[in-house]
Image (tube, grey):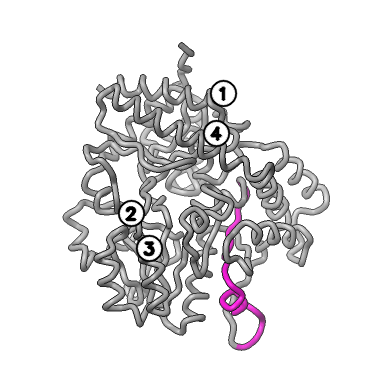
């Protein structure tokens, strides 16, 4: 049996985190990296190589977080390093028309269904902001259908009911309580937001009977990634597509997490459903900050310069260094007729089935939900988690956090947030998956 490493030495991580708190809010630049998630304080990462990361105490971990899914090829892939080093030597950014942005866009359009046009931005949040503005301009309507439990970036109108709350605070499914995710948002911002449960056809049809003629768009993650990994029920996305089309509303697929992960064309290709607008981020940049909005010319060309128009500026849009990384990334994904996707799905499915075996053997009430290169573990007695309300009522998020902290002490790097997800990259190897099984087995024994 392979030896399980002990990675409990955190002296330098604690020192650096203490220092960070003198300058940064909570010592981090995003709350998902600090004490809100890592109860003992974060592991301070120094470097990464392939599927492994090393912290400042020189503990080595197999990384299954992969920068929240951004690192589709793992850390420091040679082809991406070479592309970026060359780009840096020639000039990182010009805020001008460049060859790399054209080359990246051409590759993007070959992969993504319906992408007659693409506009690059810098983050997924920027992409979803632009998608909503385009939808409103195109339809002449203002209202947005947003689903409970889904996160589409930190743009004000999207920040309703993305975080888990006690079940008694949620209100009835036909009239959900509207719970803002942030202070500082005027109440009037939500006047044009229709909130509804996800993965519930009955409630979906009710919303369109009552509000269909007012809706500019419905936005959805095709797989709910904000609360781990919750796939759509059979027929749900198809029905959403039918209802939006009949109502004259646009369907926006937020593929910031799922895009370029499950298939070359993301979930549109995987599920065979054509969205009107799709947004991307994370895996598109392979570790570099990027967002993208794609769709037909009739919608995207509303950004052409004339009066009136949809305004979208950005000094760093189409950043030359990032575009070089994007092109190299997409070339890797499509090499050998897309062999990377076969590998991602095979390794991911092996990890899912193996973890299920561990929990079954250890008689732990837990499920592993998802498919292929993205999944999540839920400590629950339920056979499946179908939506936000299931998650709020039936998932033991504290037990999950404790479980992941046990993994972190044994050489597996993962976020203790149950609302995120396990990620398989092209850098992972079968040995990494086997190591995960050994460590998960030991962690289950320690759960008691």
Q: Which residue is mark 2?
A: 233
Q: Which residue: 32% across, 31% down?
A: 402
Disc number lying in front (2 or 1): 2
Q: Nearer the viewer, residue 323 or 346?
A: 346
Numbered circles on residues, count: 4
The image shows residue 211 at horizontal and vertical percentages of 31, 78
Label 4 to label 2: alpha-carbon separation: 38 Å
What segment carries the magenta color?
Answer: 287-307
Label 4 to label 3: alpha-carbon separation: 30 Å
Q: Earlier in the sequence, mark 2 or mark 1?
A: 1
Q: Earlier in the sequence, mark 1 or mark 4?
A: 4
Q: What kind of element bears circle 2?
A: loop
Label 2 to label 3: alpha-carbon separation: 24 Å
Q: Is residue 46 visible?
A: no
Using the image, determine if residue 137 lies above or below residue 376. below
Compared across the picture, whether 401 is left or right of 433 comes to left
Q: Which residue: 50% across, 61% down?
A: 125
Q: Which residue sits furthest bottom? A: 307
Q: Which residue is mark 4?
A: 45
Q: Which mark is residue 159?
A: 3
Using the image, determine if residue 34 lies above or below residue 402. below
Compared across the picture, whether 222 is left or right of 335 comes to left
Q: Which residue is mark 1?
A: 58
Disc number lying in front (3 or 1): 3
Q: Earlier in the sequence, mark 4 or mark 2?
A: 4
Label 3 to label 1: alpha-carbon separation: 38 Å
Disc number lying in front (4 or 2): 2
The image shows residue 226 at horizontal and vertical percentages of 39, 51
Q: Nearer the viewer, residue 390 or 446?
A: 390
Label 1 to label 4: alpha-carbon separation: 9 Å
């Amino acid at each position: 049996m392979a030896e399980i490493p002990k990675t409990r030495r955190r002296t330098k991580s604690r020192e650096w985190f203490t220092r960070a708190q003198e300058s940064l809010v909570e010592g981090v630049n995003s709350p998902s990296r600090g004490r809100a998630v890592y109860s003992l304080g974060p592991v301070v990462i120094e470097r990464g190589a392939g599927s492994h990361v090393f912290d400042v105490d020189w503990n080595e971990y197999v990384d299954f977080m992969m920068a929240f899914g951004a690192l589709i090829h793992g850390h420091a892939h040679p082809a991406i390093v070479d592309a970026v080093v060359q780009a840096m030597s020639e000039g990182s950014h010009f805020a001008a028309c460049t060859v790399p942005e054209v080359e990246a866009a051409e590759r993007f359009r070959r992969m993504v269904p319906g992408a007659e046009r693409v506009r690059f931005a810098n983050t997924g949040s920027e992409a979803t902001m632009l998608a909503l503005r385009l939808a409103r301009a195109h339809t002449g309507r203002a209202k947005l259908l947003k689903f409970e439990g889904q996160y589409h970036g930190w743009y004000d109108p999207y920040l309703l009911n993305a975080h888990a709350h006690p079940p008694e605070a949620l209100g009835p499914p036909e009239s959900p309580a509207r719970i803002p995710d942030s202070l500082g948002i005027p109440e009037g911002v939500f006047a044009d937001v229709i909130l509804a449960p996800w993965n519930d056809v009955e409630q979906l049809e009710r919303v369109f009977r009552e509000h269909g003629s007012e809706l500019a768009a419905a936005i959805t993650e095709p797989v709910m990634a904000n609360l781990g990994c919750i796939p759509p029920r059979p027929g749900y996305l198809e029905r959403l597509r039918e209802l939006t089309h009949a109502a004259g509303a646009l369907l926006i697929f937020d593929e910031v997490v799922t895009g370029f992960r499950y298939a070359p064309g993301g979930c549109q290709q995987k599920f065979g459903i054509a969205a009107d607008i799709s947004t991307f981020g994370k895996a598109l940049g392979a570790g570099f900050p990027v967002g993208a909005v794609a769709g037909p010319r009739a919608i995207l060309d509303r950004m052409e310069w004339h009066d009136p128009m949809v305004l979208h500026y950005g000094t760093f849009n189409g950043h030359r260094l990032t575009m070089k990384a994007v092109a190299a990334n997409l070339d890797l994904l499509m090499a050998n007729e897309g062999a990377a996707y076969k590998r991602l799905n095979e390794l991911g499915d092996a990890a899912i089935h193996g973890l299920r075996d561990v929990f079954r053997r250890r008689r732990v009430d837990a499920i592993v939900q998802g498919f292929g290169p993205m999944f999540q573990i839920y400590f629950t007695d339920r056979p499946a988690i179908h939506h936000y309300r299931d998650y709020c009522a039936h998932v033991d998020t504290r037990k999950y956090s404790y479980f992941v902290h046990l993994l972190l002490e044994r050489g597996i790097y993962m976020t203790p947030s149950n609302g995120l997800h396990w990620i398989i990259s092209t850098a992972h190897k079968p040995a990494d998956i086997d190591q995960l099984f050994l460590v998960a087995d030991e962690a289950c024994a320690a759960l008691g």
